[in-house]
Structure formats: structure tokens, C-alpha cells
Image: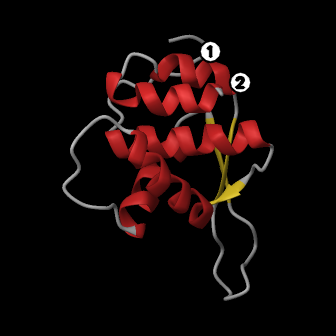
Amino acid sequence: MSDGVTVDGLSLLQRVALTSIVAAEIEGVTPVESLGIKGRVRKQLENVDTELTGEPTERDVIRALNALGAHSYVNETQPSTSVTGKGRPRYELETDPAVVVDALRGDGRLEKLLENLEG
């Protein structure tokens, strides 16, 4: 994969969360809060070609985002506080969305999802 974007070793949920960040980037609404990504993940899972045993919990999505935040192609920022006094991380890409989409293209389960991203 080019530009330092490797998706080998990412779980399906991490890959779908990554496509959610890509979608937000394409729409120009980044950085996006983890809560916003959670909603996107649930919608995007409808376009994943695999059987799921259940809907991911908020905790599952947060774990996936935490793992993605460790990669150089995803920027995780922590604002000072939210309305409730807790900081919610925000996520955005550090590389071109097309590069990330290209890196994900080898996963056949994401084919329909990636087609939707490309319009």
C-alpha cells in the first residue's frame, strides 16, 4: 500500500471505522467525534458483504478508533472537554482519502461500501 497506509492486520470493524473517517473527510466534516463515527459505522455495516453476529457496541467502535489512532495515517485529537465535562476524541485522515480507499480495495467484503464512497 502506498503513502504508509497499510490495512493488513486491521479487523473488519477497524476497516469500517476507517471508511467512516474517509467518508467524513470526503464530506468535509472532519475532524469528526467518535460518537459521529459510531453512527456512520452502523450505517456502513449494511453495505459490508459478510454475516455479522450483532451490532457493534459503542465500546467496540471506540476500541476500533483507538487502534486506528495509533496509525500514522489517522490523526486523533483530544479537545479539552465536551458539554458533559469529558473530552471526546476527534478523528481525521493524515493522507488523501483516495489512498486509504485504494489500500482497502483488496478486502472483498468492503467492495459495495467503497463503491458508495466513490459516488
Residue at 25% from the left image edge and 38% from the top image edge: 50
How far is mark 1 from mark 2, CA to CA?
A: 9 Å
Q: Give the camera-side residue of 47 and 31.
A: 47
Q: Give the camera-side residue of 50 and 28.
A: 50
Q: Can you identify the residue that label 2 sits on?
A: 96
Q: Count of labels shown? A: 2
Q: Is residue 3 above or below residue 76?
A: above
Q: Report the amino acid beneath label 1.
A: Asp
In the rendered image, which quarter is residue 36 located in? Answer: bottom right
Considering the numbered disc 2 on the image, is that residue within a helix, a strand or a loop?
loop
Q: Report the amino acid beneath label 2.
A: Asp
Considering the numbered disc 1 on the image, is that residue within a helix, a strand or a loop?
loop
Residue at 55% from the left image edge and 46% from the top image edge: 69
Q: Position of residue 84 (x, y in %)?
A: 67, 88
Disc 1 versus disc 2: nearer the observer = 2
Disc 1 to disc 2: CB gap under 8 Å:
yes
In this rendering, position of residue 90 left or right of residue 54: right
Q: Position of residue 68 (x, y in %)?
A: 49, 43
Q: Give the camera-side residue of 72 and 46.
A: 46
Q: Position of residue 116 (x, y in %)?
A: 57, 32
Residue at 76% from the left image edge and 73% from the top image edge: 80
Q: Quadrant of the C terminus?
A: top right
In the rendered image, which quarter is residue 110 located in? Answer: top left
Q: Can you identify the residue that label 1 sits on?
A: 3
Outermost residue, bottom side: 84
